[in-house]
Amino acid sequence: IGGTQTQGEKVKVAVLFDVGGRGDLSFNDMAYLGAERAKKELGVEVEYMTPKSREDMVPLLKQLAESKEYDLLVLIGFLWTTPLDQVADQYPDQKFALIDSTTGKVRENEVDILFREQEAAALIGVIASGMAYELGGDTIGAVAGMDIPPLWKFHIGYLYGAKYFEKKTGKPVKLLWQYTGTFTDTQVGYTTGMQLLQQGAKVLYGLAGLTHVGMFDAVIDWNKQGKGKALAIGQDASQEWYAPEYIPISGAKRVDVAVYTAIEMVVKNQWKGGIMTLGLKEGGVGYWNLDGVRQFAEFAQEGGKLKDMTPEDVVRIVKEQREKYIKPEVWEIVRELEEKIKNGEIKFKTPQSHDEYEQIIKELEKGNLDAALEKE
Amino acid sequence: MLKVNEKTLEVISSLIFAFLIGAIVLTLLGYNPAKVYIILFKYGYGNLEYLLNKSTPLILTGLAFSIPALAGVFNIGGESQLYVGALTALLVAYYTRNPILALILGGIAGGALGLFIGALRVYRGINEVITAIMINWTMFYILAYLISAKYHDPKNPHESVPVPSEARIGGIFIIAVLIAILYYYLLNFTELGYKLRVSGLSPKSARYAGFNPSKLILSSMLLGGLAAGLGGALLVLGITYAIDDTLSTVYGVGFTGIGIGLLGRNNPIGIIFSGIFMSGLIIGGQWVELKTGAPPELADTLVGVIVITLAVPQLYREIFKRIRREKHA
Amino acid sequence: MNAIEMENIVKVYPDGVVALKGVDFKVEAGEIHGLLGENGAGKTTLMRILYGEIKPTKGKIRVFGKEVKFSGPWDAIRSGIGMVYQHFTLVPTFTVLENLYLALLPLNPKITLKEVKKLAKEKMKETGLKIPLDEIVEDLPIGIQQRVEITKALMQNAKILILDEPTSVLTPIEVRELFKTLRKLKEKGITIVFITHKLKEVKEITDRVTVMRRGEVIGTVKTSEVSEKELAKMMVQRDVVMKIEKMPKEPGKTVLKVENLWVKDDRGLDAVKGISLEIREGEILGIAGVQGNGQRELAETLAGVRKPEKGKIIFDKKDITKTGALERYKMGIAYVPDSRKVGLVEEMNIVENTILTNLFEVVKSGRISWDKGRKMAKDIVERFEVITPSLAAKVKHLSGGNQQKIMVGREIIREPKVFIVAEPTQGLDIGATEFIRKTLLNLRDQGKGILLISTDLDEILQLSDRIAVIYEGQIMAVGKPEEFTLEKLGLLMGGVHAESE
Amino acid sequence: MLEDVFVLLSNTLFSMVPLVLAGVGEVITERSGVVNIGLEGIFILSAFLTTVVTFYTENPYLGLIIGILVGALSGLLHGIISVYLKGDQIIAGVGFNSLAYGISILSLVALWHSHGSSPSVEKMPVIIIGHLTIPPMAIVAILVGVITWWWLYKTPSGLKLRACGEDPRAAEAMGVNVHRTRLYATMVGGALTGLGGAYLVVGWIGQFTKFISAGRGFIALANVAFSNWNPLMAVVGGIIFGFFDALSIYVPIKIQKTTGRIITAESNLFRIIPYIGTLLVVTIIMKKVKAPRALGKPYIKE
Ligand SMILES: Nc1ncnc2c1ncn2[C@@H]1O[C@H](COP(=O)(O)OP(=O)(O)OP(=O)(O)O)[C@@H](O)[C@H]1O
Ligand SMILES: Nc1ncnc2c1ncn2[C@@H]1O[C@H](COP(=O)(O)OP(=O)(O)OP(=O)(O)O)[C@@H](O)[C@H]1O
Ligand SMILES: [Mg+2]
Ligand SMILES: [Mg+2]
């Protein structure tokens, strides 16, 4: 096996994280999971590096490429886009994989893997709307990080899902979308969560890394302090284990799959440069099923983070909560939407500028669902 | 001559001491200090271009802290002064394609922000620490707004519009060094520098000598802001050519500069060296993660220990004195 | 019995200066013991060691026969030692009362502010020293601050009281009061160490006197058995001329003229109230007055450091009311402030301090010539015999007198046309005092106009061609020195008009 | 609408606590003449150890005590460096911030295999009065401010402490042990900051995250200057900042809710409210700044 790889020598990969690095419970941590799985299942050697800032990226890439030590450099996050674009042509023998962004160029030595976040967010939008009505309200909310392109896509998808629900059921849904300006300040997430809940939001979608962990706590406290009933939704990783009673579901963005796929291409000698997008169809985005929930609950348990609960408990509670708050009628809408997306009937636009993004949102608010879609 | 030797000796010995303590901490944490240090030095100081580029904005934000500090003003606003310098230079370069103009206007923008902080202190009596911290965050969000909403690259919405290739510059480290030397000269050989130092050390004496303390505070903040602004300008014109929409291109450079200014003992020439020194540690720290598998925070820990140890030169002086005394006895 | 026995005290400062080279110093219980010596002889250092403020490099100390090792002044205070410093050590931003409270706490941690107030009032009555309890210390004139210092030490129930140049800023009347107090204290059995440069005072108040020179004790003698001349000789190892000759001289035209000047102090109160005066070429105009009567504000306004509310200042026929200090210094006005903390930048070296007011001499198109600066500094150090390890020594490491020499010397070498000088000889030893006074007379003989502000009436009477007495911001009287006696001056300075007498 | 006000108020109380505790603590430290800019580091370290202890004991109050202890020890370290070793206080603070962050995350990784956050821990209960939710630590913080004011201005030890910050030589000459006083003041300041760090965990979000302090240490530093080194004003400063902070989150949500207007990029501009608001308040109310005279200068005895 391994044609370009010399026999016996292990494939060596360097995974280069985003500036924030690991510990976000979502994006970067998922990348790590994917790499670790490749280590175990494909027997590759993996090393990790977290650049201190954007300016470190180009020199690090160059130095790593020049060292010729690594069969593949996996770059996590859009910050690497321009740096990669700057160096990729200088090192034709070095393979690069860019996760969650693209240089927009097709190169032999570069694989870009993108996600169609809108597809997952749309499903979550339907589910959240259903849950909100189940909780006796009509408002859903989101605690978002900074106003950056990946979040634009989530916003569009989430709103699309809500409006889709509205159209299907005739029940109006309001969305309160709040950018917190941070992916790290947990307390801001908490305060934002509280304010959204107080303004009537029943379900909060967390799209802000560590910031939305604070949002989880706001939801938990809101319930515990008897202020009302509310639920939270996680994103990227399965985050149900954090509070299964209040987080019945999480959106999935399989950064792990992307990383694993890229490494696999090298190991199995199936490398082919180009741009890949992962959506519902490819299993790259979606929502976590109970197996996923169990797996992440197990990770949490290994880290000693599951107190007074076993992964089984988590799965059981999540299952109960899903049954309680996501009614079959809602699942039906979800399935239908899922199907349409998978068969290409629904294809989301990816906004190329802020104006375009705002335009789409405005149209969606008006109920013009097609505004979010690519025209045939 | 003897004096210079003593100073160098002091610096070298305190560095040795710092790394010794660092080694103890590494051992306590369960890492092999020899291995960590070898990686740290080999990679931290091995790639000269990277090292010098990295230290360029840091030297300038170091100056941004130190010049006002000498005049008795605590400028922790180097952070935001760098932001506006970077953005201004970027936009000027984008629209005019003139790097010189971009550099100058970037510096001026930083200087103007410094001046603003100084003016609030002089004319409204507002402590510069409050102003600087509040402005730092204000500018952070304004920049985030402008980059994501107004000036993002249509081809790459993650980043600001780029510096066009004809406006990109090289040799930025040389420029930083020249500025540092200029500031050194200014402080030690010009009327203004002398006045700044007097008013920093004894405002009463400055008044007696007929110096205008308000003007001096403003001048020092202008000079400081100018340095930070130039730092931001050089960063975008010479290294990154754009600012990303999460601002990780510019975030933190000003804060790191505070430590660099102080480690350089507020001496512009010293700041050149402390800037290079710290840059090497930062760069090397990334490689320590890669090569040892240690969490990246190991580097932060080590840098922290080294910086703290360098804060107490008195300690080694005492130790040396004791050793010398014992020798004599 | 000896109250204090210090044996073989050696002090090497961290920068290597050997300030004391094995000093033996003994003070008998109940005496007033003078400590005399040139600037930089080590007097202050010796006393700071006794007070526990700094540690001796070597040596033994016994207080009332008991060997002591002080780790700080708090230990010394508990052993009954009190100290009044050359540079006052009160917390400047606190009120007088708070300072006293602070001073009493180490002795009686349970004491309350009220009790301190009561005690202070009692002490004031007992000693006759009046102090405003609720004022912020830094707002007070130096003379008053000193009273606070003394009251503080007395309230601490000091059995040994060290006074480091207490009289250098006091008027004769104040000195008399102080001596009265000291005698009273002596009667109560308090031992007093008294540092001064004024031989007259030594003769008047001390029982015995120890003379120091360059870190060594020259000897201890009974005061009644030596003359001032002999003391002076012991101190400087040469004969000192005690009386300065002043040539009669006709003053020339007016160089500085002040009309109806009104000035506010830092607190915004009127400090100078409508003063008009003239300084002529070749004349010394002495301003006599108790500190805090507007002298500082007057001097600062003349120098351009402070802006007047009203009035006019004419220099060399030009109206300079609006001109800044820097400009005036360049025009030929020089100013020596009454405080070294103002006149000197302690953290800077001698060269840097030299150019502080001479900046225009060493700057050419914005650039400083350190060569010129060094030359000037060297000149001062040589002419005024400043004792220093080098020109690069920080001024804060010099003794008080040597600091004073730099501050005054720096202005004199510039040969200004008008010289405003406050307390020019404060803290100077007799040799240096003599030298400075001679220099001032020389300047006058060269036709310069000098405004001399001093609380030392001897100095005023000796040097001035005309004397103006200032009281509460107004000139009480102007006249030739012959027209005044010490008594008359004293009354005028207290606000009593001669006529109404 | 009234409900909105109460919720705003509740959020104000939540976010003001660490700013007030650390602010008052730093006022104490700085009043004695020592600057400790390592507040950020103390927040992180105490928050982390509070989390560990609370996790294992399930007792948030024990966590608080640990936070205080960690803060005091950090203060001790800073005190030794700046008082006895005459170190540069700012450098030491900068270094400590880095060290505390690094060591906390390293331990986090070792303990919970996580690079970013800890498991949730037991939190302290809150007081709920109608729509008002009050963290009990808010009351503690205000009390701490008042008591500190009383201590600094009405007691002998407070007087001594302030003397050390104004004129250490004079203080020493009057029998105050400047070194010891400064050391203790730095420890007390650290302890209060540590309490603030502990609060972030057991009083607010119930867990440790790697950016838990999120610049609050520096805001607390600004609060010290805002307060003009007066503990009572530090309470006011914390409340003002906390209020604007809550407001900056409230306003865009409210606009969306009532007008349906979508707020995207402009959300960045709303985030400016606490900073600009505080600056404006300062501009309006600030009188002459009166920092302790000897602030940041080591007191060196020969
Ligand atoms: N803090 C210090 N560091 C270094 N040297 C010092 C310090 N203080 C004093 N000296 C030096 O020690 C010597 C003695 O100084 P000291 O102040 O005791 O003299 P003094 O007799 O009190 O003089 P004066 O009459 O001028 O007050 C001087 O040479 C002085 O320069
Ligand atoms: N603050 C200072 N105090 C004393 N010396 C200083 C100071 N700053 C710099 N110097 C010294 O001054 C010297 C500078 O000498 P240089 O010949 O360069 O200029 P200069 O001689 O002062 O100017 P010029 O040629 O116009 O006379 C250096 O040795 C430097 O160490
Ligand atoms: Mg003396
Ligand atoms: Mg020369």
Image: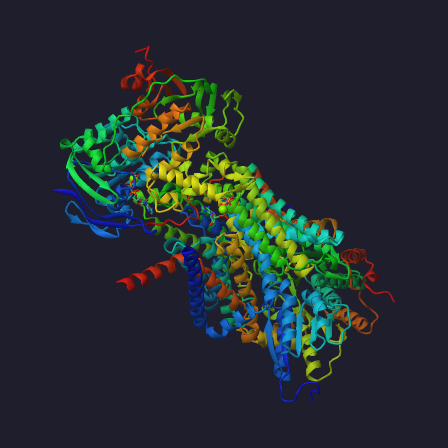
Front position in the image: A231 or C408: C408
Front position in the image: A342 or A336: A342
Q: Residue furthest left?
A: C1
x and y, in percent, of residue A159 in the image: 75, 61
Q: Is residue D40 left or right of residue B17?
A: right
Res A124 visible: yes
Front position in the image: B266 or C64: B266
Compared with residue C36, is residue A92 higher up or lower down, i.e. above or below? below
Res B136 visible: no
Q: Is residue B65 left or right of residue A321?
A: left
Compared with residue C114, is residue C450 higher up or lower down, i.e. above or below? above
x and y, in percent, of residue D189 in the image: 43, 52
Q: Residue furthest top?
A: C499
| Residue A293 in which image quadrant | bottom right
Front position in the image: C262 or A154: C262
The residue sitting at 21% across, 42% down in the picture is: C80
| Residue A201 in which image quadrant | bottom right
Compared with residue A7, is residue D264 higher up or lower down, i.e. above or below? above
